[in-house]
Amino acid sequence: MHSGPATTLSSEAVIRLGVFAAVFCAMAIAEAAAPRRSRAFGRASRWTGNLGIAALNTVLVRILIPTAAVGAAIAAGRAHFGLFNQIAIGRWPAFVLAVVALDLVVYLQHVMFHAVPALWRVHRTHHVDPDFDVTTGVRFHPIEIVVSMLIKIAAVGAMGAAPDAVVTFEVLLNATSMFSHGNLKLPERADRFLRWILVTPDMHRVHHSVVRRETNSNFGFNLPWWDYLLGTYRAEPAAGHLGMTIGIDGFPGAGEIALTAMLSHPLRGPTGRYPLGREE
């Protein structure tokens, strides 16, 4: 936990790639062994585009913001800038608070992408995936990834979060995003228990419903507490997990699979009725 800045930066990409590969493989195997829903499209057709946009986003962030949020944490530490660099609360309390606070920031950012029409058009790329599985958890438009990273950099700087806390949060967020988007059937008792500490696939799948009031619920990726506390939690989809429709009205699934369709999506079609504050 006491690695220097250079070590933290050089090892971050290796750690994130290693955890990504391990969680992705585990979830892909689990989905095949115990699927929650039947697939509307084959893996090959969807996964090519979803993993392609994830790879593009990784390269783009490395080019535009090479040190990303970890670099902001290192810079804040060197300048003694930010809350946790100004108050003496101990290394471990600051570590835990930083990870939890960053999760709240991501929850609020997610709500913002549903509330601002222009941002919703960008975020909608994630929602028009016609199926819901592990690769949906990495399917985001490059504009959203860059905006998200800038928000995290600002939050990390304001908090003065330690570099190892930021790496831990990023790894957890990536892993839990793949888990919470999994087409995985968990035992009902296990799902009820896990929902106290972690967003489960059944919990987050509600958020991908075509029904507007369900789309605008269950915003958490990692910790479920913010949905409970802020009134955005919905236990189940009205049609049930097997009967619900995944996607967004007006965007047929077959036309939203290719990488080119994902990249052009924000420019296509009307904004629609989904953004928060609009008429049902």
Image: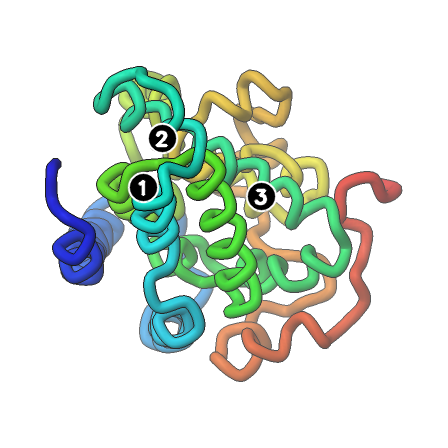
32 w.r.t. 185: above or below: below
Task: Tell me the residue that label 2 is attached to.
Answer: 85
**Badge 2: residue crowd in 10 Å (few <14, some 14–19, many ≥20):** many
The three-letter amino acid code for the residue at tag 2 is: Asn
Q: Which residue is drawn at 66% across and 44% down?
A: 112
Q: Which residue lies furthest to the right in this view?
A: 279
Q: Using the numbered discs, state the Cα–Cα distance from disc 1 to disc 3 in whole angstroms.
A: 24 Å
Which of the 4 image quadrants contains residue 243? top right
Q: In which quarter of the image is the C terminus?
A: top right
Label 1's element?
helix
Image-based side of 160 in relation to 6, left or right? right
Q: Which of 26 and 13 is in front in this view?
A: 13
Read off the residue under disc 3: 109
- State left or right for residue 24 relative to residue 85: left
Identify the mark nearer the N-term, 3 or 2.
Answer: 2
Reply above or below: 156 against 44.
above
Q: Quadrant of residue 206?
A: top right
The numbered mark, 1 or 3, whose residue comes first in the sequence reads: 1
Q: Picture coordinates of residue 106 (x, y %)?
A: 50, 41
Q: Which residue is drawn at 64% across and 69% down?
A: 252
**Callout 1 amino acid:** Gly
Spatial CA distance of label 2 from label 1 is 7 Å
Q: Determine whether label 2 and label 1 are within 8 Å by CB.
A: yes
* Residue position for label 1: 77
Which residue does the image show at 51% across and 47% down from the upper left? 154
